[in-house]
Each structure stands twice: as structure tokens, then as C-alpha cells.
Amino acid sequence: MYTLYGFPRTRSVRVAWALEELGLPYEYTCVNLKAGEHRTEGFVALNPAGKIPTLQTEFGSMSESAAIVTWLLDKHGQQEFMPVLGSGERLLYEQAMAFLITELEPPLWNMVKHDFALPESHRIAQMQEVAKYEFNTAMTTFSALLANNDYLTGPLFTGVDIVAGHILSWAKGSGFELTDDNVRAYADKVLSRPAYRAAWKNEVAHLPT
């Protein structure tokens, strides 16, 4: 059984979503970020960066949500949730995943950092507008990558759609409007999957009181 260390309404939902899609049993351990539990000696031993999500596997602990999702689906979901290595669909997967974590997501994270996550002396007020511009620019590319396909690699729902779905949910929660019809339909489709709803519900149930 896997152990997922996470916190509600963070990137850990991506890993929970993948585990739910695969039907794998897992234990969810809430790391209370507000109480500083991610900086404790015990957790830093699992993840030196002191960040969530962290997944405890038979090979040790693993961090970085996009990498965890890819590893889990490679291990347990080949042919069903993951294109095979070396295929044209896997080319699209790798390309889209790299774009998501280097271009589409960073503006959203910059907004959070310069709103409350960074020490106040390091926050730049203008970053909010810069991030909005960068995100909207990246969304144009995302729309082109998706084109008129059902999912980012074609007809198959894969791990890259988990990461994309979470980013689009994050964007909508931050007040961004998805203006492209196909992108909006895509977001509605992936975020209505039962596995996503189960992962979200399970995480929220662990929200510290």
C-alpha cells in the first residue's frame, strides 16, 4: 500500500487522483502546512525540500507531483492510462507534461507566492499582473496543443490530463475564465471524472480543524 503525504487543495490531489483512477489502496497522511509540519525533522527526512506531495513507495519516498503521477501510471496503468514508451502518443505526453509544469503552472504559483507564500519583504505586487499575462499567453499554447482532441494525447485519458485538469481547476479558482470552447469542455470533462471527485473528497475530509 502506498502512503501519500499531502494537504487539501494542493498539488497532492493530483497523486490522489492517479491512485483513485488506478483503484489502488493508499493511506492519506495530512501534513499540516499551516502548523509547519512540513518543516519537521521527520518529514524533511522523507522529502528534503519539505514539500508535498510525497509518496512513500516500496523503493523509498518520491516527490514532484508530475513525476509521481507519471511513475504510478507507468507502473500500474500501461495501455489504460499511459501511452507506451517510444510511441507517438508518448511523445505528445512528454511534450505536454513539460509544457504544463514549466509554462502553464508557474504563473499561478507566482501569484500565490507573491500574495502570501513568500516573506512579505520578498513579495512583488506587480507580479500579479505579470503572472496573469504569462498565464493567458500560455493558455493560447495549451489550446493549440489540445486542438480538437478529446485529451492531450488523443482519445486516451492519461496522466498528463490529470495534471492539466488540476491546473485548470486552480486557474478557475483564481478567477481566470477559460474562453476557448474546447478547453472549457475539456476541463469540464476531466474534472467530472469520479476518481477526481473521490480524491478531492478524501483530501477535504483530512482538512485540519
Image (spheres, rainbow, N blue to C red):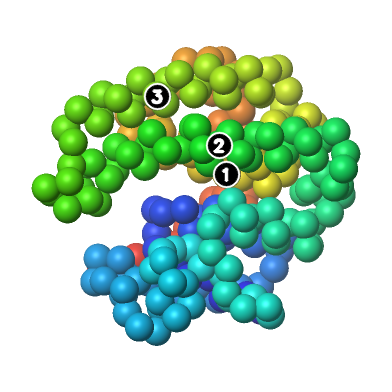
Residue 85 disc label: none
* Residue under numbered circle 3: 134
Which comes before the other along the chain, label 1 or label 2?
A: 2
Q: Quadrant of the N terminus?
A: bottom right
> Badge 1 is on which residue?
163
Cα separation, mark 1 vs mark 2, equals 8 Å
Say if 29 sits above or below 179 in the image.
Answer: below
Callout 3 secondary element: helix
Q: Amino acid at mark 3?
A: Glu
The percent position of residue 203, horizontal first and vertical second, equals: 45, 62
Q: Is residue 26 visible?
A: yes
Residue type, label 2 = Leu
Mark 1 and mark 3: span between their CA atoms?
Answer: 18 Å
CB under 8 Å between callouts 1 and 3? no
* Within-10-Å neighbours for mark 1: few <14, some 14–19, many 20+: many
Residue count near mark 3 (Cα–Cα under 10 Å), binned few <14, some 14–19, many ≥20: some
Quadrant of residue 42 within the rendered picture: bottom left
Question: Vertical placement of 74 versus 149: above or below?
Answer: below
Q: Please tell me which residue is depicted at 62% across the width and 59% down the height of the picture.
A: 68
Single out the mark in the foreground, 1 or 2: 2
Residue 188 pos. (x, y %): 56, 31
